[in-house]
Structure formats: structure tokens, C-alpha cells
Amino acid sequence: MSDAVSPLASPFPALPAIAGVTPRIARAGYKAWGRCDLTYVELAEGTAVAGVFTRNLCCSSEVELGRRNVAQGRARALVVNAGNSNAFTGYRGREAVEQIMAQVADALGCPADEVFVSSTGVIGVPLPKDKARDGVAAALAAAPCTWEDAARTIGTTDTFPKGAMATALVDGRKVTLAAIIKGSGMIAPDMATMLGYVFTDCAIAPAYLQDLLGEANRRTFSCITVDSDTSTSDTVLAFATGAAGNAELSGPDSPGADAFAAALEDICRQLAHLVVKDGEGAQKFIAVSVSGAVSDDSARKVGLAIANSPLVKTAIAGEDANWGRVVMAVGKAGEPADRDRLSIGFGGIWAAREGQPLPDYDEAPVAAHLKGREVSIEVDLGLGTGRATVWTCDLTHGYISINADYRS
Amino acid sequence: MSDAVSPLASPFPALPAIAGVTPRIARAGYKAWGRCDLTYVELAEGTAVAGVFTRNLCCSSEVELGRRNVAQGRARALVVNAGNSNAFTGYRGREAVEQIMAQVADALGCPADEVFVSSTGVIGVPLPKDKARDGVAAALAAAPCTWEDAARTIGTTDTFPKGAMATALVDGRKVTLAAIIKGSGMIAPDMATMLGYVFTDCAIAPAYLQDLLGEANRRTFSCITVDSDTSTSDTVLAFATGAAGNAELSGPDSPGADAFAAALEDICRQLAHLVVKDGEGAQKFIAVSVSGAVSDDSARKVGLAIANSPLVKTAIAGEDANWGRVVMAVGKAGEPADRDRLSIGFGGIWAAREGQPLPDYDEAPVAAHLKGREVSIEVDLGLGTGRATVWTCDLTHGYISINADYRS
């Protein structure tokens, strides 16, 4: 963890234990830091698993194997290495992951493909097998830890530990979700990696959990951006132990399916916001809401074009209601847009409507809104009913300092 | 012009006069600056014209009308306003452009659609018609000026005036090309606009000039990026007076067509490089060469993904041979790539080959290369024969200072 905590940080919440889920931490020593860097989470037999992974074609072996393992639907353990992403390391990197899977499978007496591994940190250095072996052995023997300990241990240059919870009433039973995530700090020559893990006691079929996680992902993790760069290791996994005792959810018609889906999306949105709030150099949290698009997907693409525009992000950093830059970003998004129907606002106040600046536009309340930590940009394309909200942070000197002001 | 000149600036070259082309400048007073801000270039009767324009859907009336006018192929005059982009100004903005076209057409006795207008500067403020009228009248009456005067006058926050020349032997005649361009500085609440103008005495049919300009554009202006943001006003126009007296070029089989095409591409590449060298906050000029792609277009897209990556650009600013970030950018480009065939180098020295770091990689010569003003990144995808080079600059504190450290 970095010393300088993000101004957008929040205290770690009181997360409940999830029946059938036991986190432990240990020190593998992947980097020259004194803290724990290996997180091990043991899961009850029969735990359902679902996952979404980076689309980066240069993905790590962890991602390749995780994507393969998710297909069989069950998980007994999760291992997260911090300090080495093991990406772009060829067959040696893959051997290290397979060693960890075999070691944990041996200890638990389960198939190796029920062990999920993630790694985050430096790229291009094969994960050292000896350190991994000793670290896993230490974690297997360690006492259970708190969620906050686990959240700190999966972090690399994160400036604060991140967790979230949610509950739902499913089939007359209260089901609980707890989740941790890391992401968005970076250190030379590391790359940002977003690793998120959701744990629940809900009973749910793996295939349906995958459907719900994919849907939640489209509206949460796929709607955030810090700098438009996609990590080679991004991973979100959901584990469901079934200990809540509800009748297993198997599809949208199962009683309580809607409630669980809403809770899952809620916890994913919380996690996604926490990543943005720890964005490199972030001083402001920005929500970009696009309406009037030809489809929800089109609205999301326009929103991301705005949220990824360096000119929009620096304007917000400068607390400048520069709606011209928003116009520019809409126009370059490659989605249907009509300049003469376009409206732009900040903090719920329109600055321009239907292609022209408002004659009676009063910038004072907008300027006041932009001075806050949480800023909103509203765009109405005036074409259809598609809408989406995406989230990002501003682009500041802090980003440059973190990513340029060093030598490797 | 800004006071702080880019460290990548070069002196304005000695540009030749082009027969049939007469530049003049005047002061319309669009902004509270004392310098000239209106450029007028008179062209001989029968001058052929071709143009490429921004793809931004929220383009200015200047771009809309210019795109329309190019279709008829002839030009008598060019007017460039600096300090007001006239974009996103609705019907009032359009009326101002049509007024300028009519005023010049009246003076020259030509159709209004042979008058081309460009504007650059603040967005969302209709170009003031009275200032435009007086400015155009003053320019029509002014004495001819130098290319350097014209290059300075079309600039806004550019830190140096930019021009280039080229020659070719066509049909036994020497033809000459001279060009000016502005772009890449920005000031609140302005947007970067790239405006480029090529003038030649070559005789060439408008349709063929359009073909050649389009082709040159794909390998030059479409291969540069400063910050991935596409202006609403980007315009490149080529004007050919025919005064060199060569037999008119009408297609690739005309004698000398290849020589002229090469000269046109050469001058466009010079202009494109000058824009990058005046990129906001630029300290280093970066050439990204991609080979082994499935096609040239795919190579260009991979190159642009690298050149637009904030993490790659900050690494170069930090003189850090962070090839992991290049791997990441290749993987997110959305083009065919295979991690295990990918090679990355800097300054002609491979750091990683076929998916793995080179065991005997010596970073010392790479580190020395990265300390220079001109940096190259080489990527071999190992898939096919497609190749492309794109150009960009590094991302520095200067970019943030220019775009965030102000209040409008």
C-alpha cells in the first residue's frame, strides 16, 4: 500500500463472514517488502464459481487457466499473488501457476482445476516457484484472517483496502455477499491489474451465476475507466458456497433470483466505484450519464469516449465546465450522434441544448458543483431511449508523477 | 503563439513562392490579442482543390461546407480564422461562414463555393459577423505576406510556426509544393484543431488530387496522435494552380504521377511530424513501427493503440524501457496478436522476443536511446507482412498544466 491515501478513499466496511469461505494470508516475498503478499481463500466443497476476465489478447497464464477452469463450474480455493503479475513469461510462468494449483489440490484432495490463481505486479518476470511453494505452504497452515487483511494483501500500489457487502432475501433465506477488490495503483514497471472477488453463501447453479456475473459486469466493471489501458490480468471471480440453505437458483424464474441478481450487481458497482476512487492521481470521482442514445450499448460507448478523453478529464481536474470538450468526445465516439440534437450538462444543469449554448446559461452553480469531489456530466443525444452511466476519475499531475517520474 | 517554444521545434524553412498563390493576413480581432488572426490566400483561376476533413460527427459548419465545396473541384480563395472555431454554434455559425464565402466571391467574381473557410479556437461562440466582415475586407486590401507570416497567423496556441516544402519532376517540369499547418497547442476552453494547407503549381485534375491526398493522409496525418482526441475542425486542403505548365496529371498512368504522389506524401509527412513536435507538453518525438501484422491497416491500429496509451507515453517521458506496457497496449488493440509470437524493442534493440524477455537483454544501450529527443519503439507481431509507422509524443506534466491548470 502506498503512503499517500486517495482523497476519495473510504474506511473499510464491516464485512460479514460468509459460511464456507475462509481467507488466510502469508508472506511469499515476491518483492522486497515486509508485508504479506499471498492470499489464500478456502471454499467449501461444492462451491459454484463464475468469472469474467480481461479481453487483452496478451493475457497471463493465470487468466488463461482461470477461464478454462471456470467452465467446469466448481471451486475449492483461490490463491492471489501480489507483486508479480507473471504475465508475458511464457512456459515458465505457466508452470508456476500449475505448480500452485497442484500443491493446493494435493492439500485439499480436490481436482487441480478447482483451484483458481491470480497474480498482479511486475510483468515479464516468471513467478519464482520456490517462493510460491513456500508461500502457499505457509498460507495453508495460517490462521484465518479478516476480510480487511485479505483486501490489503491482494493490493499492490492501491492506496486503501477495498471491500463491499450486500444482502438479498432468496427463497425465504437471507443470503449475504462479501467482496474484496484491488486495482488502479501502479508502480514501475508494473501495470494496473483489477482483481475482484465476490463470495456468497447463496445456493446457485454455476451456469446461472456466470450469466448474472456477466450481466452485472457489463453495467459495472465494464463501465469504469481510469486511463483506457486494459490490463493483461484483470479478473473478477464470484464464489457461491450454498451454505445459506436456499433452494438453488438455476435461472431467472427461480424464486429470489431477481433479488440475488440485484444484490450481485450492487456489490459489483460498489467495487467498481472503489477502483475508480483509487485511480492514479484521482482527485475527483466522475459519473458520466448518457441518455437519448440509439441503444444502451451505444450510450455506454459514448460515455466511455467521454470518460477516456484526456481533454475532458483534465478539464474536470481544472474544475472547468468545458462542455466543448464533451461535444468533441461525443463526436469522435463513432456512435450515432447528431450535433444539432445534442445537449450537455454538469451536475444536472444544462450548459448547451440541441446543438447550441443556452443563451441564459449561468455558470455559477456549475462551477460550484465542479469544486466538489463527486462530479457528474450529463449528455442527452436526443436520438432514442438508450442510456448508460460510466465512471472515471480526473487526470492530474499525480497520474504523470506515478507513471513517469521514475526510472526502472 | 505561446512564449514557451517546444524543445522539439525547428526553424521555419525557406519556402518558395508558388505561382498563382498569394497569401495575405489581417487582424479581425476575434480575441483580445494584438496580432493578425485572419489569413487570406488568393488562388489563380482554375486551381484544383482536394480536401480531407475530421470524422468527428460534431464537426463545424466550416467542415460541412468545405466537404461540400471540394466536390466541385475548383478553388479561388482560402480564409482561415484563428481564435474562434465557430464549432457547435448552430445556424448563426453557419451564417457567418456563408457571409465570408459571399464577400470573397463578390470581390473575386467567382462562385461562392470556390471559397474555402476554416476556423480554429474557442468552441460554442458564433464567429462574430462584423469582425469577420472587416477582417476579410482588410485582408483583401493587404499586401502579400510571407509563408512564415501566414503560418504564424493561422496558429493559436502553437509554440512555433510550421511549414514544409517538396519538389518533383513531372512531365519534364519542376513542380513545387509549399505547405503550412497549425495544430496541437490548446488553451482553455479551446480544442486542438489541425489545419493544414498544401499549395502547388502542379497541373492536376481535382479528382486525382483528391485520390492522392486521401492516400497520403492515410499514411501521414492519420498516423499521428497527441492525445487520442479528435477535433471538430480538422482540415487538410491541397490547392494546385497548374502554373508549372506540365501536362495535367489525371491518374496513376500520367507521366510524373508517381513523382508528384511521392512529393505530396513527403510534404504531408513533414507537416504531420511538425504537429506532433508541437504536441502539448511534448518533450520527446516517438515513432512506433509495427511489422508482422496481418495487414497494413491492422499494423496502423496496433501502432495507434500503443501511441495512445497513457502508460506507454508516460513511460517514455520517464525514459523507462517499460516493454510490458507495450505488450499491454498490443493486447488491447483489438487486432490479431499472439502473445507467444510478439517481439518488442526500443531504438532498434529487442527487449523481448516471441513472448518472453530476452535472457541476455542489455538495457544500457536502450536507456541511452530513451534519453534522446527522438525515440523509436519497434513491435513485430510475427503474424504476417503488414506494417505501419505512427508518430506521437510523450505525456508529461506539461500536458496536464496546459489542459487542467486554469479556470475558464
Image (spheres, coloured by chain):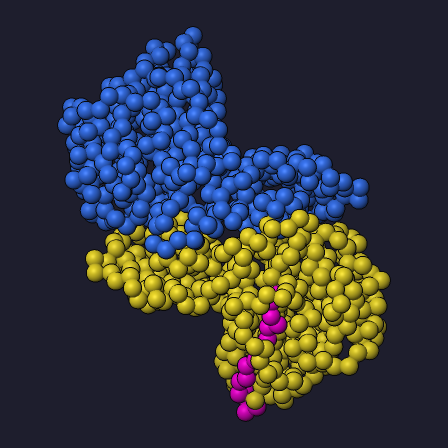
Chain colours: A yellow, B blue
Instruction: Tell me: A136 left or right of A75.
Output: right
Whole-percent x, y for residue B320 in the image: 65, 46
Q: Position of residue B102 (x, y in %)?
A: 17, 33
| Residue at horizontal 54 percent and vertical 92 percent from the top | A172
Q: In this view, does B158 lie above or below A134?
A: above
* Quadrant in which the C terminus of chain B appears: bottom left
From the viewer's perspective, tell me whether residue A346 is left or right of residue A124. Answer: left
Picture coordinates of residue B53, whole percent (x, y): 36, 37
Image-quadrant location for residue A102? bottom right
Picture quadrant of residue A231: bottom right
Residue in the picture at 56% in, 60% down: A280
Q: Position of residue A36 (x, y in %)?
A: 74, 70
B44 to A4, vertically: above or below = above
Q: Residue furthest bottom?
A: A172
At horizontal 74% and vertical 74% (from top left) the residue drawn is A25
Q: Is B107 drawn above or below residue A196 in the view shown?
A: above
Tell whether B159 sits left or right of A250.
Answer: left
Magenta stretch, residue numbers: A158-173
Which is more toward the observer, A5 or A302? A5
